[in-house]
Image (cartoon, helix red, strand yellow):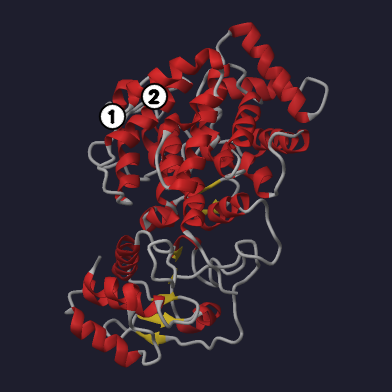
Amino acid sequence: MVVNRPIALDRAAGVLLGGACGDALGVPYEMAAPPVGEAVMKGGGLGPYDPGEWSDDTQMTLCVAGAAARGLDLTAADGLDAVAEAFAGWLVGGATDVGAQTRTVLVDADQLEGRPHERLTAASRALHERTGLTAGNGALMRTSVVGIWKVTDREATARAARAVAELTHADPLAADSSILWSEAIRVAVNEGRLDLTSGLDLVSQAHRSHWSGWIEEATGEEPARFVNNGYTVTALQAAWAAITTTDRGDRSPMHLQRGLQAAVRAGHDTDTVAAIAGSLLGARYGASAVPTQWRRMVHGWPGYRAHDLVEIAVSTWSGGRRAGTWPSVATMADPTIAPLALPHPIDPDIVLGTISDLSQTKQLGVQAVVSLCPLGLEDIPAEGVPPRDHLEAWLDEDDSDESNPHLDFVLDDVSSALRQFRAEGKRVLVHCRDATRRTPAVALRYAVDLGVAPELAERSIRQAMPGIRASGRLWDVAAHGA
């Protein structure tokens, strides 16, 4: 099965992945001193969490995403019931950290009558009537997947964002912030631009002018100015400030990393602010912009890793899972493609292969795998390879900018992952579908990065792999950079 992955699909796949990476990056610094230098996924925090483990921000997002990926309507009773039931199951079976407001609503709802979403909404409204304090950031932090649920329908996106927010957060500001962020994600996926004002006409009329001012206030501002970011308004402002202050206007995928570092340095509720920022940056730059060092580490409840986040996001963007179709297909194995298992001519502990070599990892004696083509649900991790040591790169065979928007970055990132695996003493299988374009291109970039002259590296790869298609943009960028 050959999969065409256009740029909008890349961006949709980046929404959950970017948010989860921001979450895990911010976890160690939540309610603690901001990092000195770069933030790292070292774990700890309020959980405490393992290195790379995401927190309640992504956990609750996945509760919403579970319904969205099934194709359920997030504005209708059945879809909202599914989300409400997922929240209840998460509270008793997976929550590692729960916001006070969210916990109160979930516990109170359990004592009420009615359908699951009706009980939650009623408990949420009752809490707001008692306290008037229900504009926490807990609805905004989980809204990202709503932005890819109906990517061609801004009104449906807004209705879903409001309905999902109101399950636990009755204050209109909480719903407004969710609408603004979900619509910004929808625009970023469809149009490749960052615009938080695009949804102003969709928020509550009473607060529209306030939101315009709040967004303007945060644009280009120092994120740490909005340190009291447990409030949904300041959480949105801190995330937007982190994005806009690190935007150099060059459309570089490095903006994603710069933005998340700035979000964490804002302090206070670091995992939430970085998760919010990461979802929009992921929507703008795509899964292809998320570095392998983060994808390797990120994981969390309910036992998911990077591959699962991509599968859920793409399924949501596609209107729901379709059995037998990527990304929900069991395997991408193709019996018509022969295995290759060719030692790299410069480093024989890098094994160059096809999709058929993925079933022979034990025989090949590899301890790590880098896959350059789409995989099925049962293809990853490969047999005998720890989950964190089987990486996927978002790399397409097509030479167009549309299919490979960050080609030089991806090639450099994959080469860096190979060098890291080798520094750890691991023998590595690197493969694509048929080893005619992506595998030799990565092999070439790896050789060049080891210090081999491009002309000599090209000649070595061509001689070792005579059947390859060594031409075009993919090959040229691998040898000489963008």
- For badge 1, the amino acid type reads Gly
Secondary element at tag 2: helix
Task: Decide: is 338 above or below 398.
Answer: below
Can residue 453 be seen here? The reply is yes
Specify the quadrant of the image occupied by residue 430: bottom left
The N terminus lies in quadrant: bottom right
Specify the quadrant of the image occupied by residue 216: top left
The tag earlier along the polypeptide, 2 or 1, is 2
Left or right for 451, reference 128: left
| Residue 357 in picture, x, y percent from top left | 51, 81
| Residue 281 in picture, x, y percent from top left | 40, 43
| Residue pointed to by mark 1 | 220
How crowded is the residue under tag 1: few (<14 C-alpha within 10 Å), some, or many (20+)?
some
Q: CA distance from mark 2 to mark 1?
A: 10 Å
Can residue 50 be seen here? The reply is no
**Residue at figure coordinates x 37%, y 25% from the top left:** 268
- For badge 2, the amino acid type reads Ile
**Residue at figure coordinates x 44%, y 68% from the top left:** 396
How crowded is the residue under tag 2: few (<14 C-alpha within 10 Å), some, or many (20+)?
some
Q: Are marks 2 and 1 in contact (CB under 8 Å)?
A: no
Which mark, residue 215?
A: 2
159, 32: nearer the viewer: 159
The number of numbered badges drawn on the structure is 2
| Residue 369 in picture, x, y percent from top left | 44, 71
| Residue 121 in picture, x, y percent from top left | 70, 22
